[in-house]
Image (cartoon, rainbow, N blue to C red):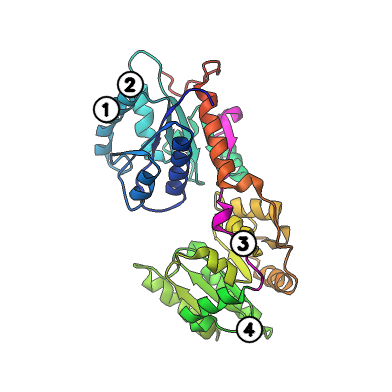
């Protein structure tokens, strides 16, 4: 295993989302292997979950978009010196800049290694370019790696490492198909989902970028062929998105399918939601860096249908090609849905590269490689 390391992860806050979840998962792996894990952020609702892993948290608002945030550079540098940090891992752009400046002003002596993770497909700019300056630049998909090399061609490809986000298969166990108990439980909450026809599921927050309107249009086409299909969109109904929900409800009413659609708040039982469904949709209008929904649903044993672009398209082409549809071709989407509902793809999909354990092991291996005295170091801090 080598010597124990001190790894400091930097991110804006610990409220919700994939960045926050990955931060906690890596911190947990570090502590379990005997390393010291420190997270610097503004805190948030996931802080208890982080502390439960044995990770130290330092509250510092390094993600606030204000010139005043630069005052935290000296504070962070002092923290890194006192902690004896070996690795500084930045997971977001502004925290990365703060970390980079803290390391630039390092006094004489060994300086911590700088790692970044590119979690998203941010618009290329000098501001975003900081995420390509890590000695190791972790990309959460091949899609992200290709994007970085295209948008920042001066980046040394040898520093890019694809480490996909992973899931814990135990949290998404295979479910029988159909899972009548799961469907009945959901129908008890949302009676409009009760029926003998297939249940379509599109989980996602309340923004048109998630493709809810495409799902409504798909349901309209399926029901127009005589199918008793139903559609559940957990997560679309949330505070501040009332106008958007009303717009979706109008579209469903105009299509004559309002009584077969449930637009609901997020569900805490997403694994049960997958189990209750017959077909999971991933219809994001913008390419996503990764497609966690795809991995989760396939782990439960449910087919996934989605627009074949970004990380979602990458995963579908690799794991379940039947579900990959050219973006925004609604007729092709409808045809693929009918085919998959008539004869679902095999339920068993082997995904060893997309497990939580694989993601943790690969990330810690990156840390150990950088900390190896024999490592040929790249200097991300010229001048």
Closer to the camera in the image, 181 or 146:
181
Give neighbour class at mark 4: few <14, some 14-19, many 20+ (Cα, 10 Å).
few
Residue range (magenta): 152-178
Q: Which corner quadrant of the image does residue 156 belong to?
A: top right
Local SS, label 3? helix
Mark 1, residue position: 74
Mark 4, residue position: 196
Q: Position of residue 315 (x, y in %)?
A: 65, 52
> In the picture shown, does residue 177 fall above or below 119?
below
> In the picture shown, does residue 45 fall above or below 282?
above
Residue shown at 71% from the left, 72% from the top: 335
Q: Earlier in the sequence, mark 2 or mark 4?
A: 2
User: Residue 105, which numbered label?
Assistant: 2
Q: Is residue 154 magenta?
A: yes
Local SS, label 4? loop
User: Residue 300, which numbered label?
Assistant: 3
Q: Which corner quadrant of the image does residue 199 belong to?
A: bottom right
Spatial distance from mark 3 to mark 2, Cα to Cα? 49 Å
The rendered magenta stretch, by its main secondary structure, is classed as loop
Q: Quick check: marks 3 and 4 in contact, CB under 8 Å?
A: no
Closer to the camera in the image, 49 or 240:
49
Q: Quick check: marks 1 and 2 in contact, CB under 8 Å?
A: yes
């Amino acid at each position: 295993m080598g010597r124990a390391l001190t790894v400091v992860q930097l991110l804006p806050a610990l409220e919700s989302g994939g960045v926050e979840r990955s931060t906690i998962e890596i911190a947990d792996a570090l502590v379990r292997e005997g390393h010291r894990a420190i997270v610097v952020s503004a805190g948030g609702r996931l802080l208890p979950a982080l502390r439960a892993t044995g990770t130290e948290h330092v509250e510092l608002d390094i993600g606030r978009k204000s010139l005043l945030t630069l005052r935290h550079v000296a504070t962070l540098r002092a923290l890194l010196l006192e902690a004896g940090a070996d690795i500084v891992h930045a997971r977001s752009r502004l925290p990365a800049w703060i970390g980079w400046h803290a390391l630039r002003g390092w006094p004489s002596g060994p300086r911590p290694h700088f790692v970044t993770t590119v979690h998203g497909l941010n618009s290329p700019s000098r501001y975003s370019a900081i995420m390509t300056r890590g000695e190791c630049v972790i990309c959460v998909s091949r899609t992200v790696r290709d994007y970085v090399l295209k948008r920042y061609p001066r980046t040394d490809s040898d520093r890019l490492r694809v480490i996909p986000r992973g899931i814990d298969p135990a949290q998404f166990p295979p479910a029988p198909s159909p899972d009548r108990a799961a469907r009945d439980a959901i129908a008890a909450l949302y009676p409009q989902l009760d029926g003998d026809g297939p249940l379509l599921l599109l989980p996602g927050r309340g923004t048109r970028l998630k493709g809810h309107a495409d799902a409504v249009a798909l349901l309209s086409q399926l029901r127009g062929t005589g199918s008793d299909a139903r559609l559940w969109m957990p997560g679309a109904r949330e505070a501040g998105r009332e106008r958007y929900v009303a717009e979706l409800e109008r579209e469903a009413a105009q299509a004559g399918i309002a009584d077969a659609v449930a637009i609901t708040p997020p569900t805490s039982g997403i694994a049960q939601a997958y189990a209750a469904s017959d077909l999971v949709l991933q219809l994001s209008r913008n390419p996503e860096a990764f497609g966690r929904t795809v991995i989760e649903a396939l782990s439960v044993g449910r087919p996934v249908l989605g627009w074949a672009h970004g990380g979602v398209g990458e995963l579908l082409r690799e794991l379940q090609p039947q579900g990959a549809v050219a973006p925004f071709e609604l007729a092709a989407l409808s045809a693929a849905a009918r085919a998959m509902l008539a004869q679902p793809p095999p339920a068993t999909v082997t995904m060893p590269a997309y497990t939580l354990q694989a993601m943790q092991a690969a990330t810690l291996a990156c840390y150990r490689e950088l900390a190896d005295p024999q490592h040929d170091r790249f200097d991300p801090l010229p001048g």
